[in-house]
Image (tube, helix red, strand yellow):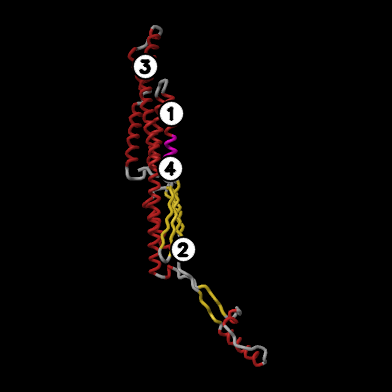
Amino acid sequence: MIKSMTGFASVTREDERASVAVTIRALNHRYLDLQLRTPQTLSALEAEIRAQVGRTVARGRVELSVSVQVRETQGVDVEFNEDFGRALEAALDKARARGLVQGALTPGDLLRLPQAVTIRERQAGDPGEDVTAAAALAALARGAVEQALRELDTMRAHEGDHVRTDLDTRRSFVADLVERVAVAADEGRAAMEQRLAERVRQLRTELQADEASVAQEIVRMAARSDISEEVVRFRGHVSHWVTLSDGAEPCGRKLDFLLQEMNREVNTMGSKADGLRVSELIIAAKAELEKMREQVQNVE
């Protein structure tokens, strides 16, 4: 199966307690390289998330980020400094006795004295401290990661269809080029045999040579330019390519190796075959194989 290594997915899941956001970016890489970022409250899920990614992605650089936002409303704690209050009350009683102040102390008076009242925001409870809340948060995150991976896989498969269309077109073209090379090589070999035979006839009057030995040498020279084995192997590689592309397993690495073998066969054809059109066809085939190799670098 041909899938692209690149893709993106972003998923947010919420409940009454928290909101979990998962973002995944996938890029080309020779092997599977997972860069995982999770908050401390979900650290226990890291191994499970890595396993989830491994079941979905065979290779590529995957950047997966999980963020959590707790929805609880924070309250406040108000503390009265009783020691300060008693000291203040005693001081006010002395002041009243001396006629310096009048009236009772009001709550507003206390709020204007920073030493009297301390107001603190109540910290929201850590989900990890509550087993039930922690389990609910983990389930929420697990579901978000699973959905994000499904969306990522869908995107990579969709892009892979476009990549396959391009590769199939190029594969058919290069296969046709090789068939044309085979025809041109056969024509070149026949022309070479004819030229050699004609040259032998011209030299026969000048040299005393064994005709059987000369004929054997002509056959050997023609055999050295025979590319039938390379053509058969190339056809086998093309057939193997189709099998890999139609299979269920990721095939990017195997296709890359197969292209190396196909390129090797074409190079051998170019060094052995003789003919007016062979060089032109070999150059075109090698150029097309290079384009395929560049495209295969995007395949998982």
Determine whether 298 is above or below 127 in the image.
above
What kind of element bears circle 1?
helix
* Residue span colored magenta: 290-298
- Which residue is tagged 4? 298
Rendered view: 160 above or below 17: above
Q: Which residue is mark 2?
A: 69
- Mark 3, other Cα within 10 Å: few <14 / some 14–19 / many ≥20: some
The label nearer to you, 2 versus 1, is 2
Q: Which residue corresponds to the image point at 36% horizontal and 30% vertical from the top-left?
A: 175
Distance from the alpha carbon under mark 4 to that under mark 2? 35 Å
Estimate the spatial distance between the alpha carbons at disc 3 and disc 1, rounded to whole Å: 27 Å
Q: Are marks 2 and 1 in contact (CB under 8 Å)?
A: no
The numbered mark at residue 284 is: 1
Looking at the rendered structure, the secondary structure element under dot 2 is: strand
What residue sits 58% from the left and 79% below the top?
111
Q: Secondary structure at mark 4?
A: loop
Q: Compare marks 4 and 2 and give the one earlier in the sequence.
A: 2
Q: Residue furthest bottom?
A: 97
Give the mark nearest the N terminus, 4 or 3. 3
- Left or right: 193, with 27 as reference point: left
Q: Nearer the viewer, mark 4 or mark 2?
A: 2
